[in-house]
Image (cartoon, rainbow, N blue to C red):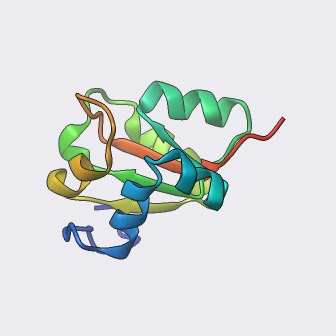
């Protein structure tokens, strides 16, 4: 846990439900948000000054040792960091093998 808040553990939490809805293009377009999943993809977004507004974290699913620095970069950029249980994180994720990091960010419009 990061100390920012309690761990999200309820599958019926409104924030969890909203992230699940963001998996649908119509909801993403309506909310003008997108999901970014995985260490490499979130790092790429940060390197291009595309800051998430929320970062959902499940430490039980981390695959490396660099996640802490990435979480701190998001926190420094004012993203809200939300710890999740593995069950909650797995419900929100869209990958077959989740890495424990899922960001919600503004859509990129060109």
Q: Quadrant of the N terminus?
A: bottom left
Left or right, 5 with respect to 41, comes to: left
Query: Residue 25 or 48: which is nearer the viewer?
Result: 25
Q: Is residue 33 visible?
A: yes
> Is 86 rendered above or below residue 108?
below
Image height check: is 99 above or below 11?
A: above
Residue 77, can we see it?
no
Numbered label tally:
0
Q: Residue at x 54, y 56 (%)?
A: 27
Which residue is the extreme one toward the front?
Answer: 26
Percent of width and height locating residue 8: 26, 68
Viewer-proximal residue among 95 and 52: 95
**Left or right relative to 13: residue 11:** left
Query: Picture coordinates of residue 62 (x, y %)?
Result: 26, 36
Q: Residue shown at 15%/54% (left/top)? A: 87
Q: Residue at x 29, y 74 (%)?
A: 13
**Residue 73, how many percent across, how many down?**
57, 45
x and y percentages locating residue 68 in the rendered image: 40, 42
Quadrant of res 110: top right
Based on the displayed image, in which of its 4 quarters is residue 19 positioned? Answer: bottom left
């Amino acid at each position: 846990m990061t100390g920012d808040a309690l761990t999200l553990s309820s599958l019926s939490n409104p924030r969890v439900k909203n992230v699940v809805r963001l998996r649908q293009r119509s909801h993403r377009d309506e909310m003008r948000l997108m999901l970014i999943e995985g260490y490499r993809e979130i790092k790429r977004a940060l390197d291009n000054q595309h800051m998430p507004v929320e970062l959902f974290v499940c430490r039980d699913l981390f695959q490396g040792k660099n996640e802490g620095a990435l979480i701190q970069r998001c926190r420094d950029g004012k993203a809200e960091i939300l710890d999740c249980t593995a069950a909650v994180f797995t419900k929100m994720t869209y990958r077959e093998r989740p890495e424990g990091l899922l960001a919600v960010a503004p859509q990129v419009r060109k």
